[in-house]
Amino acid sequence: MLWRLSYFFLWQLTGGALGWWQGGAWGAALGAGIAAWGWFFWDLSRGARVLGWLRTGDPEQTPVMRGIWGDTADRVRRLLRRHEVQLRDSEGRLQEFLAAMQATPNGVVLLDAQGRIEWCNQIAALHFGFDVRRDVMQSIGNLVREPAFTAYFAAKQFTRDVVLEGRASTSSRPVRISVHVHPYGDGRKLLLSRDVTALEQAEAMRSDFVANVSHEIRTPLTVLAGFVETLQTLSLSQEEQSRYLGMMSQQAQRMQSVVQDLLTLSRLEGSPPPGMGEWTAVHALLQRCEMEGRALSALVTQGQQKPHQISFPDPQRLIDAGELAGSAAELQSALSNLISNAVRYTPAGGSITVEWLPMTDGAAMFLVRDTGPGIAPEHIPRLTERFYRVDRSRSRETGGTGLGLAIVKHVLQRHGASLEITSTVGKGSVFAVNFPASRLRISDSTGSRQPVSSE
Ligand code: ADP
């Protein structure tokens, strides 16, 4: 400020001195006046330069000058720089926050007080079919037109969620989306969406399972209760009584098998998969399967004209098949189950062939081939579902529970193996189990054990 005043007086003094030199006292007064106006315009032009620069606000173009206007420009430049840094920081934080919102597995939509979309993440766009850029500031009510959502949004009762059909839903692949609105701030809303398809399917499966189990247990129980009542109320001959008791024992056995298989399934689901510590010789495994299969075949073809033609691999060749890693009891039950199905569903006189095929990469395949009734293609993908049967009466006749292949699938999954089913109606079926090389090992000439694969 002092400099400014000094400059002003310097101008006046110079103007006054020049005026004095030219025209005495009057000349001095005129010179000082002209100098004051000159200073005023010079100062105005400097102010105008700073003002012009402020209009662009570009810190790079700051006018370089001294005095009060130079200081003002410099201070404004520093303020602009600080503001720029703060803006960049906030922008960075906003981008990080939006990236976190994008990373959530749920859909997130921010709505303004009028219900217009301010921002939404990719998952929400997928759930509702939004275009992340084009639909910004569009009203959610115009974009999500499902009546359930319209009613939910209009009622403003946001204490619960509403379940809608996802935009990508098709009849073969339904998608269900749970939507929950959370009001915040000044009438704004946060809309969260979650894919609940798997959850709903699991719930449907659970209730189907409970209904199936109840049905499977209730049917023999009702028959048993009927027989008990008959025995209690009617005076039956010794022969009739023993016939009834035989039928009662059959029903009790049926219930026992269902309960046994359910317990097996629950044990398989509840225990960790068997590790690589236990090894079972393939030839011993198949020998036990052969014994059980032949015994079952003799039982089911009892009194029939022709027995089954059953063939198993040569036990001598199986000695070289090596060992399988995993639980011997589980593997035995899975492979036996496939053989038992072939025996139970193949009519007397049909043939059942069991094979063990080592692959060149060290993997191996266990095959059960039969000449039974075969299975229509539409049933094949569902055979490993619990209680799924192609022919209910045939399954029950042969003592089936409908849980056999579900158990097989579980056991194989736990052993890194997979099941492949191919079948032709009227010709027969092939159930193939693929064991990976990592689960097999063979003996070398010194008798020590080596993994089959080089993995
Ligand atoms: P189940 O106890 O009824 O045999 P599974 O789970 O073992 O139950 O098999 C499911 C269904 O698959 C059976 O009910 C049967 O209809 C069909 N199935 C299984 N194995 C065979 C086979 N070898 N030949 C024909 N149908 C089969």
Image: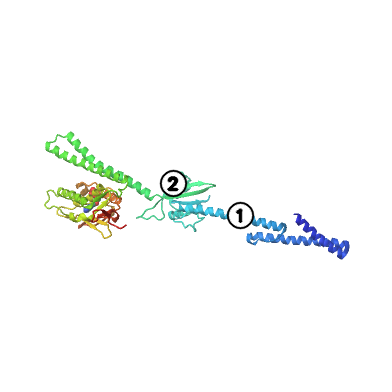
Q: Nearest the camera: 36 or 211?
A: 36
Q: Which residue is mark 1?
A: 83
* x then y, percent, for residue 179: 44, 49
Query: Does 136 appear above or below 239?
Result: below
Quarter of the image for the C terminus: give it: bottom left
Q: Where residue 161 is drawn, which disc sits there? A: 2
Q: Nearest the camera: 357 or 419?
A: 357
Q: Where residue 290 is drawn, which disc sits there? A: none
Quarter of the image for the N terminus: give it: bottom right
In the image, taking residue 277 as reference, residue 44 lies left or right, namely right
**Going by the picture, which residue comes out furthest to the front?**
446
Determine whether the beta carbon of the residue marked 2 sits less than 8 angstroms from the nearest atom of ligand 1: no
Query: Which picture quadrant has residue 228?
Result: top left
Q: Nearest the camera: 368 or 345?
A: 368
Question: In the rendered structure, which disc, 1 or 2, sits on the residue that comes first in sequence?
Answer: 1
| Secondary structure at numbered mark 2 | loop
Q: Amino acid at mark 1?
A: His
* x then y, percent, for residue 111: 51, 51
In the image, taking residue 104 as reference, residue 300 lies left or right, namely left
* Mark 2: few/some/many CA within 10 Å (<14, 14-19, 20+): some
* Mark 1: few/some/many CA within 10 Å (<14, 14-19, 20+): few
